[in-house]
């Protein structure tokens, strides 16, 4: 192992660095909610622009439909994310009440569950007794342990309001990007307007992909081009559908 890599590993494993990393691991990041909203906002809005262009309709139609989509779909997606986060939160609350009740009614049975959980992890003898005693002497710690070890629940859930708001803001900001060139329709030809919208959308996809790569600890460049490809495929499909519908319209 190179010396510089060894030094970096040592710095990452100081007591302070470990404490900071463990604390960060339990904190919820809303970056994923932002990326989700941004990708959906960009894809669906540019799909409208591409579909309208494929159908040969005016830029004004695309602008009206696009703005309606940004507001309505953005709110709908934010509401869905809010309800999901709230439902996850309620699941934890329900199991917490259940475990509180079980500890109150059958403490010996719940204590035995703790014993078996940690026995399965390799603890035994006096050490196991000490672990069980330490956990069960604090009611909050006891319940938290049952929630994470028996039910596999994550205790630190995201705020439903923040999750929904983050999704809506991301959808709104990214969804407006494909529509910006439509405001210059008086100075650009329809083909130039569509090309400008496509370029702006591709740049937006690329930036979102870089953020995705950071979240997933993947190559940012690979993630960026992957996002551009997927978004471009969705837009191309919308354009083709619009063109087919244009051919089916009277005078098309």
Image (spheres, grey):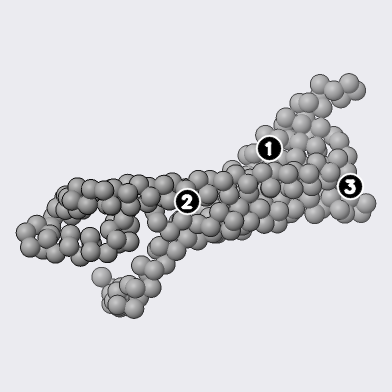
Q: CA distance from mark 3 to mark 1?
A: 20 Å
Quadrant in the rendering for residue 210: bottom right
Q: Mark 3 = which residue? A: 189
Q: Secondary structure at mark 2?
A: helix
Q: Secondary structure at mark 1?
A: helix
Q: Nearer the viewer, residue 93 or 30?
A: 93
Viewer-proximal residue among 215 and 157: 157
**Percent coordinates x, y for residue 134 in the rendering:** 20, 65
Mark 1, residues whose alpha carbon is within 10 Å: few (<14), some, or many (≥20)? some
Instruction: Name above or below for residue 237 compared with residue 148.
Output: above
Q: Residue at x 82, y 27 (%)?
A: 246
Q: Position of residue 198 (x, y in %)?
A: 73, 48
Q: Residues within 10 Å of mark 2 (few under 14, many from 20)?
A: some
Rendered-image quadrant of the C terminus: top right
Image quarter in which the N terminus is found: bottom left
Q: Is residue 245 left or right of residue 88?
A: right
Marked residue nearer the N-terminal end (3 or 1): 3
175 versus 134 height, above or below: above
């Amino acid at each position: 192992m190179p010396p510089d890599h060894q030094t970096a590993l040592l710095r990452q494993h100081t007591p302070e660095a470990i404490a900071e990393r463990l604390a960060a691991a339990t904190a919820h990041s809303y970056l994923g909610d932002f990326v989700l909203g941004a990708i959906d906002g960009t894809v669906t809005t540019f799909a409208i622009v591409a579909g309208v262009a494929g159908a040969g309709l005016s830029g004004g139609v695309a602008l009206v439909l696009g703005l309606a989509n940004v507001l309505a779909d953005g709110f709908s997606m934010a509401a869905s994310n809010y309800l999901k986060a709230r439902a996850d939160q309620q699941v934890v609350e329900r199991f917490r009440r259940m475990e509180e009740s079980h500890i109150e009614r059958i403490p010996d049975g719940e204590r035995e569950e703790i014993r078996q959980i940690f026995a399965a992890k390799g603890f035994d003898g006096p050490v196991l007794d000490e672990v069980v005693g330490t956990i069960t002497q604090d009611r909050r710690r006891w319940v938290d342990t049952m929630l994470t070890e028996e039910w596999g629940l994550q205790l630190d859930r995201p705020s439903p309001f923040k999750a929904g708001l983050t999704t809506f803001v991301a959808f709104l900001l990214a969804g407006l990007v494909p529509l910006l060139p439509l405001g210059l329709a008086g100075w650009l030809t329809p083909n130039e307007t569509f090309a400008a919208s496509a370029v702006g959308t591709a740049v937006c996809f690329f930036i979102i992909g870089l953020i995705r790569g950071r979240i997933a600890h993947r190559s940012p460049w690979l993630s960026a081009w992957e996002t551009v490809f997927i978004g471009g495929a969705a837009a191309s499909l919308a354009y083709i559908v619009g063109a087919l519908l244009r051919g089916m319209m009277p005078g098309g």
